[in-house]
Amino acid sequence: MLRPVTTDIEALKILDERLRWLSSWTIHHANHVRESADGLKVGGHQASCASMTAIMSALYFHALGPNDRVAVKPHAGPVLHAIHYLLGTQSREALENFRGFGGAQSYPSRTKDKIPVDFSTGSVGLGVAITLFASLVQDYLTAHGWMDESDRGRFVALIGDAELDEGNIYEAIIEGTKHDVRNLWWIVDYNRQSLDATSADRMFERFDEIFRSCGWRVVEIRYGKKLSRALEGNSALKDWFEKLSNAELSALHYQGGAAWRRRIEDALGKKSATFLKEHDEASLAALFTDLGGHCMETLVEAFDAAQDDVPTFFIAWTIKGFGLPFAGHKDNHAGLMNPTQLGALRETMGVREGQEWEPLEGVGDNSRPGVEALLERSRIAREKRPRAFGSVDVPAIPAPAGDEQSTQAAFGRILLDLSKAGGALADRVVTTSPDVTVSTNLGAWVNQRGLFRRAEMPDIFAQAKIASAQKWGANNNGQHIELGIAESNLFLMLAAAGLSGDLFAERLFPIGTLYDPFIARGLDALNYACYQDARFLLVATPSGITLGPEGGAHQSINPPLIALGQPGLRHYEPAFADELAAMMEEAFRLIDDRAGESTYLRLSTRSIEQVPRSDDGWRDGALAGGYWLREPGPDAEAAIVSMGAVIPEALSAWEELKDDVPGIGLLAVTSPDLLHRGWTTAQAARWNGERQPSHIEQLLSRLSRGAGLVTIADAAPASLSWLGGVFGQRVVPLGVEKFGQTGNLADLYAAYRLDGDAITEAVAEILLPA
Ligand SMILES: Cc1ncc(C[n+]2csc(CCOP(=O)(O)OP(=O)(O)O)c2C)c(N)n1
Ligand SMILES: [Mg+2]
C-alpha cells in the first residue's frame, strides 16, 4: 500500500505511480481486453510511457504554470491522457477506446483529441522544434503589445533520446540562437534506447556541447537521491558505473539484482565487498534504478532551480519500461505486457481487479486529500482554451494596376499597398522567409514594416549611406522574421505563428515565402503544420521551367501534385494579377475562419499581358478552381485547359484555332486541388441522395460528352490530366515530366511541348478520327 501524504513530493510520487498504471492499463485494455473486430494488433508503447511518468508527474502536477505549453513525446501520449483522466478532463470512454475510432488518439493530436493538446506530435523531432518557434511568436506578440509580459509562458518539449538524431532539431536551435529565444525547457527522456536498439555511446556528452554552444543551459539529471548518496563515498563503484555502455546498463536493468551483484563482484573484486554485504539483490535493483528521471525530489529540485527564462536542456536519465517486466530490454519499444505480467503489476500497484479504471485506486485514505488538492491546483492550470477566430476584418484587396505583370511582382505590390493603406490586417501580417526575402519580392514590404528582433539592430549599410534597395533596420516592432536558409524552419515558424490564435488568443496572418522546388525540403514540417490546423499563407515563387535561365535545379515540377494530396492546404495558381489579389483576400479570410485552411500560392516571375475584364464574373469561378476565360460554344467538341504562367500560349493557340474548331473554349484552371475536392465531395454527397453538381462538372458540362481536352501546365501533367475522368472526355495532357534545364522561354517551351504549336497539334489529334 502507498504511504500517507506528508508533502507534495509524496503526492507527486503517488501520481507518478498512478500514471504508470493508467498508461499501462489503457494500452493493455486496447490490446487484450477490448474486442478486436479485425484481428489487427492495436499497439501502444508501455515502455516509452513508463520511462517518463515521473518526469510528467513532476511537470504537470508541480512545475507547469497556466500559460505554459507542452509538446509531448508522441509515444508518451497515453501518459498525457492519464494525466487528464486524473484531472477529470478526459473520459473513461475515450481511454477505453484508445486507438479506436473516435477514441483517444495514439499520439497527442490538437484537432482530434478532446483533451487540451498544445502541440500535436507523431513525426519525431518536429514537436520539439515547434516549441522554439512558439516561444519566438510569444516574444513577437509581447513586443507588439498584444500580450502582457506577465501572461508569458514557458514552452516545454518532452523528447525521446533517439529523437535527438533528427536534424531539424539542430536547424531550429541554430535559428533560435540568432533570435535569442528564451522560455524553453527541453527535457530529454534519456533512456538510451530507440526503437531498434540501445543508442550509440559516442553521442554521450556531445549533446551537451552542442546545446551549450548554442547558448542553452544544460542540466543533467543523472542520479536519484539514493543512488547519488551510494556512489558519493564509493569512487570505485561510481567510476565503474559511469563507464558502463548504454547496452550494458540496459541489460543490467533488465536482468536485475543478481546480475548487478555478479557484475560488481567481477569488476571490483574485494573493493566491493562491504558494499555488497550491505545490499541484497532487491536493494541493488532498487538502488541502480534510482536514476534522476525517476526520482521525484531530484526532478522537482531541477525544475525549481530553472525558473529564469534561459533556454534549458534537461537530460533526465531514465530506464525504458521502468517498473515493468521488460524494463531495459532492447526490444521493448513496442513490447506489451501479457495478461499475467499485467496482473502482477496490478497487484504490486495495489489495484483491485475490476477497479482498474478507478482514478485514485490504491491511494490510501490518508493520502487522498493531499493528492486531490494537488490535482485540483493542476486542473486550473491545464484548462482547455477555446480557439479564437473571426477577430480581424479582411478588407478587399485591390489588384495592382499594370498591363504586363508577373504574379510574383504583383504579390510584392499587393503587400506594399496593404502596408501603405494600413489597418488591422496589415498590422497583424507577419512575414517570414528562409533567406529568400528579396528574391521572392518581399523587399518592399520589409522596407516599410521592418525586421523583427527583440534587440534593436541598426542597418549598418544605411547608416554608412551605402546605396541599397533594402533598408532593413530591425527592432521589436518589425513585422518580418528573417530566417536562415533551412526550409524546415520556415514551415515550423509558419506552424507556430499559424497557431497564435489558439496558443495565445491573438490572431496573426503569417505569410511565408520560398522557392517552389524547395517545398520538398520542408515537406514533413509543412504536413505537420497542416496536421494541427495551423493557418498561414505560403507563397512559393518562382516555379516551373518558366524560370528559364536558372535551370533545372530551381525549376519545380511536382508541387501541384503535392498540394493535390495535402489536406489542410489549398493550392491556387493564378495567371493574372487580379486573380492573385482575389486569392490573397480569400487566403486571409480562410486564416481567420473556423472552417478555413491554409493556402499555397504557386507564382511565377514571367511577366505576361493582363486580360481586360468587362465584369467580375470570373472571380467566383477563379476562387472555386477555374472559369471559362473564353466561353465554349454549345456542345463544343474541344477545349484548352490551362493553368498559371503558360496562359499566353493557351490564348494564342485559342486565337489560332477558334475559326477551325468552332466553339472551342479556353478554361483557366486556378486550383486543380479545389476542383478535385469539389468533384469527390459531390460524388460522396450523391450517395446521400444530394445531386448538386460540383464546380468542375458544371464547367465541363458546357462541352459535348465526347469533347477532347488539351490540358497545359508548367508542372507535372497529372495535375490536370485527371479532368478526363469527370465525364470520360479524352485528354491530351501537356506539362513537364523531365527535369528542367537552362534556356530561354521559347526554347524551353518548344523542347518541353508547352508552346502554342504543341497545343494546336494536340487539339488536332483529339479532333481527327484515330
Ligand atoms: C520522423 C519519424 N521517424 C520514425 C518514427 C518511428 N519511431 C517512433 S518512436 C521511435 C524511436 C523512439 O526512440 P526514443 O526517441 O528514444 O523514444 P523512447 O521510446 O525511447 O522514449 C521511432 C523510430 C517516427 N515516429 N517519426
Ligand atoms: Mg529512448
Image (cartoon, rainbow, N blue to C red):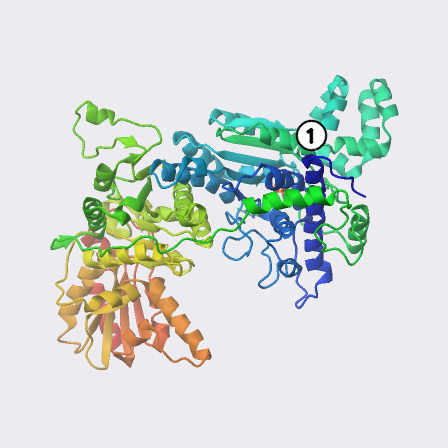
Tell which of 157 and 65 is nearer to you.
Answer: 65
Return the x and y of residue 410 as percentages of the image width and height.
20, 50
Tell which of 286 and 135 is nearer to you.
Answer: 135
Name the image quarter holding the N terminus: top right
Name the image quarter holding the C terminus: bottom left
Q: Which residue is mark 1?
A: 245
Q: Label 1, secondary structure: give it.
A: loop
Outermost residue, right direction? 277
- Residue visible at 74% across and 27% down? 227
Query: Which quadrant of the view contains residue 158?
Result: top right
Structural crowding at the residue carrying mark 1, measured as other residues with C-alpha within 10 Å and reported as few (<14), some (14–19) or many (≥20)? some
- Residue visible at 49% across and 44% down? 126
Tell which of 70 and 712 is nearer to you.
Answer: 70
Tell which of 379 and 618 is nearer to you.
Answer: 379
Query: Which quadrant of the view contains residue 700?
Result: bottom left
Tell whether 150 sits left or right of 157.
left
Judge whether residue 264 can be spotted in this image: yes
Return the x and y of residue 539 as percentages of the image width and height.
31, 50
Return the x and y of residue 249 as percentages of the image width and height.
72, 32
Return the x and y of residue 541 as percentages of the image width and height.
28, 48
Judge whether residue 335 can be spotted in this image: no
Q: Is residue 363 above or below residue 132?
A: below
Q: Is residue 651 above or below residue 186?
A: below
